[in-house]
Structures are given as C-alpha cells and as structure tokens.
Amino acid sequence: QVQLVESGGGLVQPGGSLRLSCAASGSMLRLYVMGWYRQAPGKERELVAAIATSGTTNYGDPVKGRFTISRDNVKNTVYLQMNSLKPEDTAVYYCNANFGVNYWGKGTLVTVSS
C-alpha cells in the first residue's frame, strides 16, 4: 500500500513561484513512476509532469519550460517546482504513484490570482 501526502499549495500572484512536495510511504517506491496531475473546476484531470525511475521526465504542453519535476528516492519525496505561474494554472494538484496500480494523494490547492 502506498500513501501520498501533498503539501506546498497556496495563493500566489501571477508570475510567482511555488514548490509542491509529495511525501510517499511504502516499499519499493524507487520502482514507481511518480507524477503530478491537476484538475481545475469544470475540467478533467490532466497530466502536469511525470518522472520515471530512470529520471526521465515528461511534461504537459501547458507547463513545459515553466515547471520542473524531481524526485528524491532516499526521502521518498517528489517535488514540482512551478515558476512563471499563470491564472490558468489554478487547480487542485494531485500526486500520483504508478507501478501497474495507480495511487493518488488527496491534493493541494494552487490559486494564481492578483
């Protein structure tokens, strides 16, 4: 069983930055693909970024060049550095762990507004 707890969300002005963290518990997490997804009101959940066990990363088109995903397999933590935030980045951000089975955190709200 894997448990994921997100933190770091909040209110930020356009152009600002936030760093999200996802603390994971469970064994063999280094074998999991870890990712961040987001869901804005009235929209479907979408991929923000994912990082494989090899360190290979994948980003959704809206965040390329602005967001960076990283992982610390010793601390069992995944990070999402978000820069140049825009109002359209406002959403609940969810941490995901995948190893054939998907695990989800409860989410953290990011609001980008002046």
Image: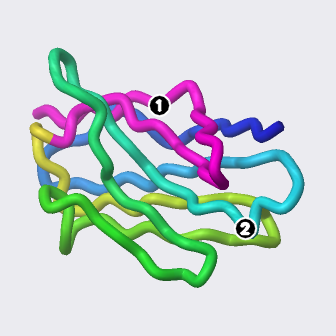
Three-letter amino acid code at the position of disc 1: Thr
- Residue 36 at what x, y percent from top left? 44, 49
> How is the structure coloured here?
rainbow
In the rendered image, the vertical position of residue 81 relative to residue 42, given as above or below: below
Residue farthest along the front direction in this orientation: 100
Residue visible at 81% across and 71% down in the picture: 74
Which of 107 and 59 lies nearest the eye of the viewer?
59
In which quadrant of the rendered image does the N terminus lie?
A: top right
Mark carried by residue 19: none
In the rendered image, the vertical position of residue 48 relative to residue 8, given as above or below: below
Three-letter amino acid code at the position of disc 2: Leu
- Residue 92 at what x, y percent from top left? 36, 29
- Residue 78 at what x, y percent from top left? 59, 59
Residue visible at 48% across and 54% down in the picture: 35
- Secondary structure, mark 1, is strand
Which of 36 and 81 lies nearest the eye of the viewer?
36
Quadrant housing residue 57: bottom left
Q: What range of the chain is rendered magenta?
A: 89-114
